[in-house]
């Protein structure tokens, strides 16, 4: 029995003892959890009980953005040792699946992902995890920062897919957590200038601090007009759609340059109205991402080198005993709030 | 004054004398036209008087799919000579535009394209054209075949964008001229198996003759079901959308494999309903094409090597004097008709 | 105990009983061998006892190019069944290695490859192999042809790395087995014209039959001169080096066009003299391959579609009882000989 | 007649009046020169009278790394105006050449490049240049910095060719001007960690200041050993060869990871010993660069955003009247010297 943050059912969260059975395999490690971020998906399971086809049918521990410390290593693990500070990739694929063999393990339908029903998350004292998906931290990356690797990975994966060339100019639509980590990743990946749009001035101000060259509040300015002005009418090299809004997509093909790229990161609930002709006259390349693959060690290196500083994104940290309050805060966040973390007792 | 097929205005076509002023530049050639294909766009200008923003406001010579014979060469042309059999790329970009400098001259907004208002087409005895966009034919490629290079170029450009790997499996939706040239191009570009869908059994039969492994009449079979069956449930590597139908697009993301690509070639008039989540779970890459760039010499080589045989696509040939009848035929084509050509007196 | 072709030590080959211990895992199949090609590496182990760091220190069964029939399937295998005709990828990687996770399992140093010491090959009645590396044949691909999938895979992998665009022009230097399969693969992958060079007219004649547009006997003609003549001075898009000769490499950068690619397939024993300046003025991209990854199912599809016909490459077939004679033949092959196969009794 | 730095012949430099005839075309601008860097090639022409096939046969003005101010614009130039601060790309290609049409104008053999015989350079008061190759500076980029765009362009072009992914680890061999600009470019392009090797501790110290994570003096440490240690034995993603040394190349294939890339920037005078087998077991991709294309506006943006700071590379600035002394200084530079500039009177 371990004490954990358990989603009993929709709208009902407990901090209580629960039985979790896990066995340390030869290539596994046991990790003591330290910092855990609350993700929008955690909140969504809490408030809706499901995301798409994934439905909470039995009590499930929440949490998948985590850092920790190695407590024990399996017999065949040599690259990690007790006491190592680490972060963990929350999805474990079947290494022999067709997708995994191709190197796109994130697209393996059999992937087991923390806090995606029926798999338990990690808002609990410890967890057993494959060493291959556990990454040692350099000394200058804190456990707080390391719990941000998971969201950052989305931005880095999107930036990789975008095939950014040094000196590119980009647009990011939507200044939420995903928009911010995409901004950090795109800047580190070579974008010289990034234009960020949103409807919230507080978020746009934070975007400026994080490296946006230009911000656009789309309540008062037209994004395409700003893009044209900032690029001498040519358009941006890359557009990252992070708002998930159905209205935004149509403007992206007007914002990009001939031969430009659009990366969809936000996922609108309903199909969007997509103008093939607008995309055709630009010969747009459109990329989609699903979580991430192979980017955790890259994120750790980017934090360690100082190329990416996620600290301004961590709005507030709660103790483990205050986990329920942390979720309440995250469910109805004050203006300007980005990421809420829970810190385990060490 | 030259005799030409002139679109006077919507619905009104004449075979009459018209004045065309052209001057042979140092890097130009004068070409005697031989075979000219009638394109869907020629027919559309005839029946509607416009395509999107391009409107016929003054009498315009139609035709842009052409082969011919060199009659005269400019002072600085050494690679072509009188008597050479050639085909011609119908769009002439500004070589110093930003898009042209980047090598994507097809996206140059200043491109001058035959039979796109207000630029005259080539249903006339001769034309002056830059040598750089005029391509010599090998002996084993006929002038009839060479007039098919222009539509074939679309298929080859789409296949290039798709980054086909040898042994790929593809779907092509829509068995019209563009579907057929995409089939020929995709097979030559390395697709081992191509599944073609349409609603017309005669077209599907022709697809089989041109190298389709499997055909699907979507009136009686579900395309995604067939794809799953033919690929052990994995999906195809590439989907080429050639129907221009708004209903087809949503099925493409279900038809492709994880990491698959979708190339939009057909251009639906209205925006399509595009499900970002469906595309995301596959991490689909979506490509768009606008005409073509750099592929005419490739098409000529592929015809010369025998890798592509366009002959079965040429349904009927009319003499120049019968041009009006040719357009009537092309406007209301009989079942199974693909490409209509007009042949100039030699 | 099974009867097998055993390399006892350098220069000493036996057809004798040997003990092989293998156990059918849940995702394994047991395959009855049918056709087995003799590879240059088999011959090299026979005549030299080693290849680079791989030395034969104990009796080892030879053979790794194989087709067969499924005899038994493991508990979790659903995609294959008894009686299925198959071909097999001879290298089994560790699926959890870093290289495998990235999708480049051929670069996993822990790969276990048939007939690479100390791993036994498959010149024996049956073998146990993972289902994931066993590929079902379509009805129209014979077991004889299927035993050519392994060498063909090298050509297909090289063609994939070359990122061939439809209509490319290529040079292949060296008309041995690898040159021929690269020719077949490059043509199927979209190369419209291939120029093949060698010193043996009989091999060059076969190259013509297999689809070479031009052949060059470098004893009497200069390859670069021919390339310039055939490409109007521009150069070829891709050069595939298949001779393994140290002298050939320097000419490749003169043969390619600006922005062209060079793929090294042959492996010269000593370092080659590589002129960086020659490569720089073309901005050459140079690719290297090591065996292959992910291409066996592609090869099977390409054989099934008729895009690739390997039959002309199979020079002679020996019965299993004549295996020693087969190796003697392969060791001192007559002019024009390409691939020697051994056929198991069915 | 204009006063210019004229290389009369090998070893003989004058600051004297010379006649230069240039005419302002409709798409040209006239630029007053401001800061001009002395390049290794300028020094080499001075001390050797030639570089490869390019020989100084008549008095030639030196200099090609330049910033300036617009003095006059041609009739069709709208994007620049008198007084604009600019930098200039020194090579002017024929926009209609085959290479230019493909977008690889740097590979056009007809390119006219400043201070490459017989084309005059720009160590003179003004020059006429195409607007398309003249780039406006943002307010926060100084004319001193802007004269560094030309060398930086090489590093940015190399980084683009390397297809850096965010979080990559790189090695740069050779800490001269090109090594330094490649370091700046690689870091800005997403490399999280860069290991720089040289034989000069002063240069390595500067490399640290410019963002190198690790430096290696190859007199005392083995580069491959350091790489293995810093990458847990895996190897670096990219190796940039900037030393031009024939001895360095062989180690690069040991330094990279499986699937890694090697970019040759330095050009050894003699062919290097290149081990194909070493490159093959890694499936290395090798890239070469020749000057640069399309990167000047990117460099300007990267300077403007603060992503790249070239200031520490400018060792010393001489007035125009001291140009001969500047060349003497650059020919025999003191330890730690990187870039020498000449400043025109404004």
Image (tube, coloured by chain):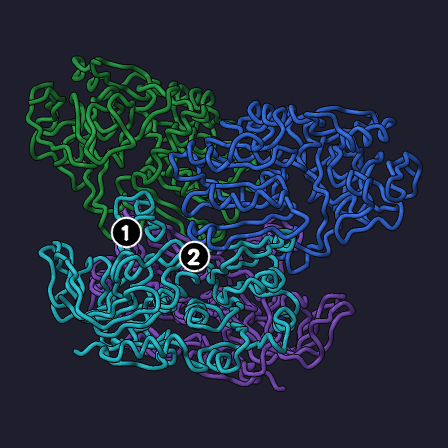
Chain colours: A cyan, B blue, C green, D purple
Q: Could you give the CA–CA distance between mark 2 and mark 1, rounded to whole angstroms? A: 17 Å
The residue beneath circle 1 is A93
Residue D149 screen position, x and y as percent: 52, 72
Is D26 in front, or is B20? B20
Task: Verify CB contact (< 8 Å) between mark 2 and mark 1.
Answer: no
Q: Which quarter of the figure has residue A171?
A: bottom right
Is D248 in front, or is B138? B138
The residue beneath circle 2 is A289
- The residue sitting at 53% across, 26% down in the picture is B211
Q: Output the chain of dot 1.
A: A
Residue A67 screen position, x and y as percent: 24, 70
N-terminal label among 2 and 1? 1
Position of the N terminus of chain C, as image quadrant, is: top left
Q: Classify residue A314 as left or right of residue A240.
A: left
Rendered position, A105 above or below B306: below
Q: Classify residue D316 as left or right of residue D110.
A: left
Q: Output the chain of dot 2.
A: A
Element at label 2: loop
């Amino acid at each position: 029995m371990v004490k954990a943050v358990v989603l009993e059912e929709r709208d009902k969260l407990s901090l209580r003892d629960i039985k979790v059975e896990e066995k340390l395999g030869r290539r596994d490690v046991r990790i003591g959890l330290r910092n855990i971020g609350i993700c929008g998906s955690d909140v969504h399971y809490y408030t809706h009980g499901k995301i798409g086809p994934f439905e909470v049918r039995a009590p499930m521990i929440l949490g998948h953005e985590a850092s920790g410390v190695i407590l024990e290593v399996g017999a065949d693990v040599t690259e990690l040792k007790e006491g190592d500070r680490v972060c963990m990739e929350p999805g474990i694929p079947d290494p022999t699946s067709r997708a995994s063999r191709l190197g796109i393990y994130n697209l393996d339908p059999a992937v087991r992902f923390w806090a995606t029903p029926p798999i338990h998350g990690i808002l609990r004292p410890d967890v057993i995890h494959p060493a291959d998906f556990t990454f040692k931290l350099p000394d200058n990356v804190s456990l707080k920062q390391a719990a941000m690797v998971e969201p950052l990975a989305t931005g880095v994966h999107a930036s990789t897919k975008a095939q950014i060339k040094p000196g590119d100019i980009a647009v990011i639509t939507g200044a939420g957590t995903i928009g911010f980590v995409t901004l950090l990743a795109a800047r580190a990946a070579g974008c010289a200038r990034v234009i960020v749009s949103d409807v919230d001035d507080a978020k746009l101000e934070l975007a400026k601090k994080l490296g946006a060259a230009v911000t656009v509040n789309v309540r008062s300015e037209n994004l395409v007009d700003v893009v044209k002005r900032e690029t001498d009418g040519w358009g941006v090299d890359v557009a990252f759609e992070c708002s998930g809004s159905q209205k935004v997509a149509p403007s992206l093909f007007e914002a990009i340059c001939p031969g430009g790229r659009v990366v969809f990161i936000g996922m609108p609930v309903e199909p969007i109205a997509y103008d093939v002709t607008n995309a055709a006259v630009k010969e747009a390349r459109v990329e989609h991402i699903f979580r991430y693959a192979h980017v955790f060690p890259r994120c750790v290196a980017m934090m360690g080198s100082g190329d990416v500083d996620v600290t301004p994104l961590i709005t507030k940290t709660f103790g483990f005993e205050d986990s329920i309050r942390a979720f309440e805060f995250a469910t109805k966040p004050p203006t300007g709030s980005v990421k809420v973390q829970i810190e385990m007792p060490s």
